[in-house]
Amino acid sequence: MTPTQTFAPPARASTLDLIGNTPLVLLKGPSEAAGCEIWGKCEFANPGASVKDRAALWIVRDAEEKGLLKPGGTIVEGTAGNTGIGIALVANALGYKTIIVMPETQSREKMDTLRALGAELVLVPAAPFSNPGHFVHTSRRLAEETEGAIWANQFDNIANRKAHIESTAPEIWEQMGGRIDGFTCAAGTGGTIAGTGMGLKAFDEGITIALTDPYGAALYNYYANGELKAEGNSVAEGIGQGRITANLEGAPVDTQFRISDEEGLEWVTRLLSEEGLCLGLSSGINVAGAVALGRQLVAEGKTQVRVATILCDTGFRYLSTLYNADWLRGKGLPVFPWLAK
Ligand code: PMP
């Protein structure tokens, strides 16, 4: 067998050093579909199994450096789940307590994982951002009312995107040997797209940064014509933004794609059945966006095009939803052939 990796990752002195430095993998099916190389950054390989471990670590370290978080303190956050899991792990490693506010529409697995990690979980009904009961506002109030607590505020705390400027982007640049033409991903807080985009542009201004938006989000229209307007909807967890968060301000977005759940799901299905990767829906949507970006760059006449995207989290987090035939049928989505029996 020909080894594809000749160096083992270096030994680490602390569990927190396990965050980041994730592998980058060439995706065969998407590369064939795009007619160029499509690479996936394996963020499911983080200790909390998602891209949000990076933001969690940077936010906590930033609060420590600013003297806001004292020994034994509490970190409060509103999250679709993955940031909470990252914060709970980082908090456990550093001796802090965690309180997580989450909409009750998120997957069972995320709730069970947060409870298992020792976080205090507060579930609230899903509500628009303008509603004071929205999980973000609820978490801010809880942080204000809790002695010795900080509010992580991942949407508007730019320590979030800094994680990607300082870690995700330089890792991708190094792993691709400085030969990268485009990068794309979807936005939840916008930390990943803005930070990775800014970080990659600092290496090479010519890299095309594309936003991949799900339906039900307003950013596609914003970057296309300046109008924050959402159309349709999506069942993807963790992505879909309706406003310009502080993390998104100044994001170097050159172009944008809008991807349906069906297109994203098709890549989730294909990556699992053809390449053995079990991913969440935001990863499938990102891969569909990367294929669209690759095709666009090839159509512009570029040769040997190489595009990178983010494989945000593990599919094991969605066994009761995305990988469950009854749930898929209930949402009117196609059922994976091997689950349909
Ligand atoms: N995918 C998943 C599964 C997520 O949980 C998140 C974070 N909300 C994202 C993508 C988007 O990342 P970001 O918040 O950096 O935009």
Image (tube, rainbow, N blue to C red):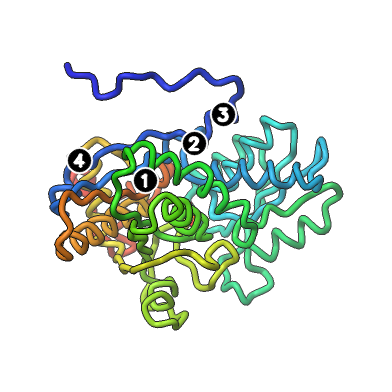
- Per the image, the residue denoted by label 4 is 273
Q: Amino acid at mark 4?
A: Ser
Q: Which quarter shows the N terminus?
A: top left
Closest to the observer: 59 or 48?
A: 59
Image-quadrant location for residue 80: bottom right
- Residue 259 lies, in percent from the top left, at 30, 65
Between the C-alphas of marks 4 and 2, the distance is 27 Å
Q: Nearer the viewer, mark 1 or mark 2?
A: 2
Please tell me how crowded label 3 is: few (under 14), some (14-19), or many (20+) other residues with Cα within 10 Å: few
Between the C-alphas of marks 3 and 2, the distance is 8 Å
Q: Please report contact status of discs 4 and 2: CB closer than 8 Å, yes or no.
A: no
- Per the image, the residue denoted by label 2 is 20
Label 4 vs 1, first from the N-terminus: 4
Q: Amino acid at mark 1?
A: Leu
What number is the disc on residue 17? 3
Q: Residue at x 65, y 47 (%)?
A: 59
Closest to the observer: 216 or 69?
A: 69
Between the C-alphas of marks 3 and 1, the distance is 20 Å
Q: Which quarter shows the C terminus?
A: top left
Label 3 vs 1, first from the N-terminus: 3
Label 4 vs 2, first from the N-terminus: 2
Q: Amino acid at mark 3?
A: Asp
Q: Nearer the viewer, mark 4 or mark 2?
A: 2
- Which element carries disc 2, helix, strand or loop? loop
Q: Is mark 2 within 8 Å of ligand 1?
A: no
Between the C-alphas of marks 4 and 1, the distance is 16 Å
